[in-house]
Image (cartoon, rainbow, N blue to C red):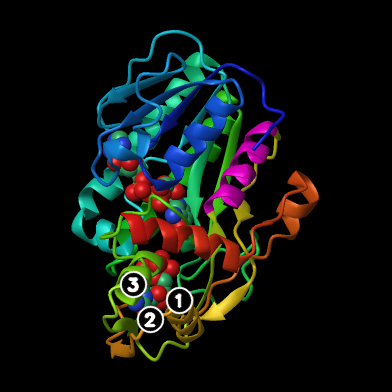
């Protein structure tokens, strides 16, 4: 992937995670230096194995909740650190709230100190169980603050508010990406999200676990497309949140059937209870990303799934 991004040294928080490791790779491919800050709470050293030892790459193993000391100049900061899967943030609710609040404050301060732009990774979960469909950036959402997803949703909503406050008070050059369901190689097989679960189950010819009646909808963006959107957004000066995702919506039943076919699997669907507050519909309106960033997903779901299934087959 080739980009027009100012060369220089970028900090990627959460760079040992699924999306962060792909982003770090792309930055290095484009002649940039990368400093990853990660505490490996949900990330894995193997995700950045190919980068370790390169002169343009360095790793700071640290919890973002502790004060950050990074020497030298930075051309920009991508703030991706946070547990992201519903299973992970249910396991680490306090850590999730702390990284969204204290971690985000530490890294926004760093952007202020280094006088560099910062992109924060927010989420479609700020819309909660949405009453508007598809979701536009102007929608304020329908979030249950005290439910099991509240730790994640509210940490990201707080992070957005804090980001806008740093922009208004300290004139930090901020960007907010609202990321919708993203998939691809390097998702942790045990992260509990629907893509790894279905791929693993179908490849093992085990029951594919659909939660609820499977009529809830999602749309899936391949990680290469998403990384392209993040880089484009960093290069823009758009201050308001912007949706990044794939608008090709389907029900979870349709997705389960697709994965079973794709894996040429003997698996049958097994219906299990729907987790509390699981959003019934989700689909990004990406009009803004198209017009402002000239960005839209290009990777067809079949092609993305081929690469992803191959990854789970070999890992
Ligand atoms: P991931 O869990 O694979 O990566 C997150 C990384 O952040 C991990 O490497 C983890 O160890 C690190 N981290 C977490 N807390 C930290 C802390 N306190 N200090 C330092 N490092 C910390 O998740 P992902 O899917 O790659 O998601 C990356 C970002 O994108 C997250 O902020 C997430 O909320 C956002 N996002 C992802 C999706 C998606 O579909 N993958 C959708 C919406 C938003
Ligand atoms: N899901 C499912 N079976 C699974 C895992 C997830 O049916 O084994 C459903 C889940 O209930 C949700 C959708 O798939 O409706 C997407 O779940 P995921 O955890 O990937 O992310 P979410 O979009 O909920 O944040």
Q: Name the residue under label 3.
A: 203
Residue carrying label 1: 259
**Residue 301 versus residue 213 in the image, above or below:** above
Report the residue that reaches farthest toward the top: 72
Q: Is 164 situated left or right of 146 in this image?
A: right
Task: Find numbered disc 3 in the image and state the secondary structure of the residue it sits on.
Answer: helix
Is 228 included in the stretch rendered in magenta? yes
Quadrant holding the N terminus:
top right
Mark 1 near ligand 2 (CB under 8 Å)? no
User: Residue at 62% of width from left, 63% of height from top?
Assistant: 246
Magenta range? 223-235
Which secondary structure is most common in the magenta stretch?
A: helix
Q: Report the front residue among 211 and 138.
A: 211
Task: Name the secondary structure under disc 1.
Answer: helix
Splitting the image into 4 quarters, where does residue 250 fall?
bottom right
Position of residue 236 in the picture relative to residue 312 (left or right): right
Mark closest to the chain's N terminus, 1 or 2: 1
The x, y position of residue 289, in whole percent, is 71, 52
- Tag in front: 1 or 2: 2
Q: Quadrant of residue 293?
A: top right
């Amino acid at each position: 992937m080739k980009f027009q991004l100012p060369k220089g040294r970028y900090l990627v928080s959460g760079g040992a995670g699924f999306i962060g490791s792909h982003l770090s790779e792309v930055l290095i491919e484009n002649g940039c230096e990368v400093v990853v800050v990660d505490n490996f709470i949900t990330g894995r050293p193997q995700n950045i194995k190919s980068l370790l030892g390169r002169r343009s790459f360095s790793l700071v193993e640290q919890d973002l909740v502790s004060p950050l000391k990074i020497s030298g100049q930075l051309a920009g900061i991508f703030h991706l650190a946070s547990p992201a899967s519903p299973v992970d943030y249910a396991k680490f609710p306090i850590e999730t709230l702390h990284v969204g609040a204290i971690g985000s404050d530490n890294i926004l301060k760093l952007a202020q100190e280094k006088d560099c732009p910062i992109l924060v990774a927010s989420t479609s979960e700020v819309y909660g169980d949405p009453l508007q469909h598809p979701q536009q950036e102007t929608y304020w959402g329908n979030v249950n603050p005290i439910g099991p997803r509240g730790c994640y949703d509210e940490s990201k909503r707080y992070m957005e508010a804090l980001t806008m406050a740093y922009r208004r008070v300290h004139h930090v050059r901020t960007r907010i990406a609202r990321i919708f369901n993203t998939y691809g190689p390097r998702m942790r097989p045990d992260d509990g999200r629907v893509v790894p679960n279905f791929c693993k189950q179908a490849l093992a010819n085990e029951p594919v676990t659909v939660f609820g009646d499977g009529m809830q909808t999602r749309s899936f963006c391949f990680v290469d497309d998403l990384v392209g959107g993040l880089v484009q957004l960093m290069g823009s000066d758009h201050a308001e949140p912007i949706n990044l995702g794939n608008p090709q919506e389907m029900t979870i039943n349709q997705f389960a059937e697709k994965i079973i076919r794709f894996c040429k699997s003997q698996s049958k669907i097994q219906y299990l209870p729907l987790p509390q507050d699981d959003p019934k519909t989700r689909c990004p309106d990406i009009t803004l990303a198209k017009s402002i960033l000239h960005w839209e997903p290009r990777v067809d779901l079949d092609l993305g799934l081929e690469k992803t299934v191959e990854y789970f087959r070999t890992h």
